Image (tube, coloured by chain):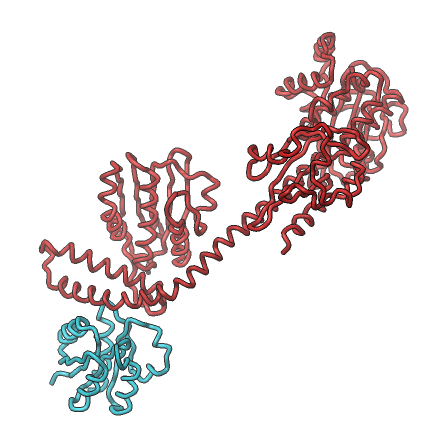
Chain colours: A red, B cyan
């Protein structure tokens, strides 16, 4: 599939302004919003260098993209700022994120800008709002309000209640939850009691000059959950409750001024709300974005009891537009972020599957050679095994060579089983097998690792239940599993540590536990550790654990991993027993 | 009288080992290092069973098998090969048994015992 088309198709669903640049930083695609919000004709921009959008005096223009790349994490740089030139020569400061999107042959740079409409409109509305605000509302020049939704909510609530803002005493924000089931209280601002009000209004003599400073103060205060915050979080109203006054406001998308004179004054839910907020008068403002009501603001003057004027209503309803747009656009940016993550994950998956394919091809080519070799080996192996078995049969158990010969014989047997598995599982004597001896296999592996265990000063705590029943698994499979896990455990421990091996019978299973005192397994690795080619080691194919998993699955055995960071990992295996 | 088995295998040590293993079972073992020699022996010697390798220089076991069964219709031939996939080849189907080479000769000796006991009875 055309990679560029794939990217553009994905981006088309995004409501922010985006530009796609080729390797020479020429614009090869952009969102239609460029025309709507920046004034440029899209056709005029295509194939133009990105730098045409930078102000004339912007320095340095040439290395603009490169300058951000050193900070890139996973090919992305977010929350960057720049100044752009609109078609009408107006300059705007704007936040953007930069993403490198590439496959093996193509490489693109994606620039995504904050929703310019919202920024422009919010600034316009807020500036025009009141004369007091006019001088002081420089917040958007100085401070990003888009860094997080929480910060936006802080700004909105402070703006509503601040002396320099809309001057309400208290504000409560409720939003429709993501499942579209409830209207949920999110956050509130304002004094919780008369005394608290006294404190706050006492302090307001020293109140900071700018909203920016107020917002910072508020953020510092917020660590303690205020009374109003606790109050608002308790509010949760099902959206299918049309009689509730808040849902009414939400559905009608019209504000409701609730006081003794309003038509709804004696509505049960109106009484409930007044009781809850302890007020005679409050204003319920729906937050509507793109025709959809997504939340409610409730404001009141509980402390000063000043009546809510038409002027107040005008201010808050106008402000609510930009408030909800800020919230929604932040959510959209969040979605965009997720889309980009998805594209990237797809990229990674493609790369992974390419690696697997390549590996498979290699295997196929090697397969024939390997099969031939394996057959050639089988004959000589039968000879070794045959002769050794003959010698072994003649030896007395007291003979000094008895153990050595038994090891040779066992090894030949294992090798032959491996060959059979490689070549054709059908001919190995799986029907006639007599069951595997778990203790014997564990001891055999320990014997092979003895020297290493000694050298690394690792203590082994071995506790095998006597007379364990035989397991329904072929010997060399069991050997392969135990061998892999024990070797991993030793590697995890490094030097000086403890390896605990337990085996006992529980009902119809034999449970083998291999525990080490290594660094443990990080959760993110735990999920991947059984996939082929996954390895944390600088050497090795990463096939060890995936082979273990395959053998366990084939033999209906279970594996559980429990890991405590810095306290080692425990592999618990359970094997069905032979009846 | 001991049953007589002809082993045709190009690998000297396999011939030696089979002589020992089958000898242990009470059989008299004679051997040939290639298919032509084996066919020559069969012309003048009566044997009860043939153990035949497949991959051999010169005439391979499959060709030898065809010749043996066409001349000695009643003579049981057991194929003894490191390769298992010739089992799929119908030309090997005229052999009474197909045993893949293994360190464990019990499958071979048991197979042979079964065949020879049957022919005796």
- Residue at figure coordinates x 45%, y 60% from the top left: A361
* Camera-nearest residue between A324 and B70: B70
Quarter placement of the C terminus of chain A: bottom left
Camera-side residue: B35 or A187?
A: B35
When asked about the image quadrant of residue A71, the answer is top right
Q: Is residue B80 above or below residue B68?
A: above
- Residue A367, x across and y down, in percent: 39, 64
Q: Position of residue B89 (x, y in %)?
A: 37, 79
Residue name at image x 34 percent, y 52 percent: A481
Please give left or right for residue A265 compared with residue A406 in the image: right
Q: Nearer the viewer, residue A444 or A104?
A: A104
Quadrant in the rendering for residue B8: bottom left
Answer left or right for B9 relative to A264.
Answer: left
Residue at horizontal 82 percent and vertical 18 percent from the top: A134
Q: Is residue A257 visible?
A: yes
Q: In terms of image quadrants, where is residue A100?
A: top right
Q: Position of residue A289 (x, y in %)?
A: 79, 36
Question: How many numbered badges does the structure rendering display?
Answer: 0
Q: Is residue A27 above or below residue A273?
A: below
The correct choice, above or below, for A471 with respect to A139 in the image is: below
Q: Residue at x 31, y 72 (%)?
A: B83
Say which quadrant the N terminus of chain A sits in.
bottom right
- Where residue A81 sits: x, y (%)? 67, 29
Residue A183 visible within the image? no
């Amino acid at each position: 599939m055309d990679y560029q088309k794939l990217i553009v198709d994905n981006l088309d669903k995004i409501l922010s302004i985006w530009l796609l640049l080729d390797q020479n930083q020429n614009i090869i695609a952009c969102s239609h919003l460029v025309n709507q919000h920046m004034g440029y004709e899209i056709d005029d921009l295509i194939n133009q260098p990105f730098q045409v959008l930078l102000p004339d005096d912007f320095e340095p223009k040439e290395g603009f993209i490169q300058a951000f790349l050193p900070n890139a994490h996973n090919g992305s740089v977010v929350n960057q700022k720049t100044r752009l030139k609109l078609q009408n020569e107006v300059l705007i400061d704007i936040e953007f994120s930069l993403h490198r999107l590439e496959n093996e042959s193509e490489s693109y740079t994606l620039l995504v800008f904050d929703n310019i409409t919202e920024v422009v409109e919010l600034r316009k509305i807020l500036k025009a709002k009141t004369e007091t605000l006019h001088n002081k509302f420089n917040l958007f020049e100085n401070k990003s309000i888009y860094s997080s939704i929480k910060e936006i909510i802080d700004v909105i609530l402070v703006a509503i209640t601040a002396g320099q803002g809309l001057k309400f005493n208290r504000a409560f924000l409720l939003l429709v939850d993501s499942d579209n089931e409830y209207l949920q209280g999110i956050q509130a601002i304002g004094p919780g009691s008369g005394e608290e009000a006294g404190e706050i209004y006492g302090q307001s003599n020293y109140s900071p000059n700018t909203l920016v400073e107020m917002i910072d103060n508020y953020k510092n205060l917020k660590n303690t959950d205020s009374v109003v915050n606790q109050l608002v979080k308790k509010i949760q109203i099902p959206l299918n409750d049309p009689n509730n006054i808040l849902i009414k406001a939400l559905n009608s998308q019209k504000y409701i001024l609730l006081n003794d004179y309003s038509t709804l004054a004696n509505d049960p839910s109106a009484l409930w709300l007044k009781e809850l907020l302890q007020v005679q008068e409050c204003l319920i403002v729906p937050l509507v974005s793109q025709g959809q009501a997504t939340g409610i603001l409730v404001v009141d003057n509980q402390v000063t009891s000043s009546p809510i004027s038409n002027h107040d209503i005008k201010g808050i309803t106008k402000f609510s537009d930009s408030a909800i747009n800020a919230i929604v656009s932040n959510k959209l940016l969040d979605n965009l972020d997720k889309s980009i993550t998805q594209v990237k994950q797809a990229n990674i998956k493609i790369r992974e599957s390419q690696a697997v394919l390549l590996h498979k091809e290699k295997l196929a080519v090697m397969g024939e050679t390997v099969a031939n070799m394996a057959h050639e080996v089988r004959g000589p192996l039968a000879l070794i095994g045959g002769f050794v078995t003959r010698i072994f049969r003649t030896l007395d158990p007291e003979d000094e060579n008895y153990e050595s010969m038994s090891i040779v014989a066992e090894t030949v047997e294992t090798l032959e089983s491996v060959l059979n598995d490689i070549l054709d599982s059908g001919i190995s004597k799986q029907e006639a097998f007599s069951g595997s001896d778990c203790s014997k296999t564990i001891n055999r592996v320990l014997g092979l690792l003895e020297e290493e265990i000694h050298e690394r000063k690792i203590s082994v705590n071995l506790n095998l239940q006597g007379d364990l029943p035989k397991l329904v698994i072929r010997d060399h499979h069991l050997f392969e599993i135990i061998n892999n896990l024990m070797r991993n455990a030793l590697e995890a421990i490094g030097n000086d540590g403890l390896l605990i091996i337990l085996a006992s019978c529980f009902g119809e299973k034999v449970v083998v536990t291999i525990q080490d005192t290594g660094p443990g397994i990080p959760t993110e690795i735990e999920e991947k550790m059984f996939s082929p080619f996954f390895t944390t080691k600088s050497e090795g194919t990463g096939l060890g654990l995936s082979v273990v998993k395959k053998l366990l699955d084939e033999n209906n055995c279970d594996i559980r991993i429990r890991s405590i960071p810095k306290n080692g990992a425990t592999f618990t295996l359970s094997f069905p027993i032979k009846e | 009288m001991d049953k007589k088995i002809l082993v045709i295998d190009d690998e000297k040590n396999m011939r030696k080992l089979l002589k020992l293993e089958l000898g242990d079972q009470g059989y008299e073992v004679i051997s040939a290092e290639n298919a032509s020699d084996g066919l020559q022996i069969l012309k003048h010697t009566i044997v009860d069973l043939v153990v035949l390798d497949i991959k051999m220089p010169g005439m391979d076991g499959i060709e030898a098998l065809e010749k043996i069964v066409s001349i000695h219709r009643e003579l049981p031939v057991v194929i003894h090969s490191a390769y298992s996939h010739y089992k799929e080849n119908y030309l090997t189907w005229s052999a009474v048994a197909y045993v893949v080479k293994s360190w464990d000769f019990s499958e071979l000796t048991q197979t042979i015992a079964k065949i020879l006991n049957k022919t005796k009875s």
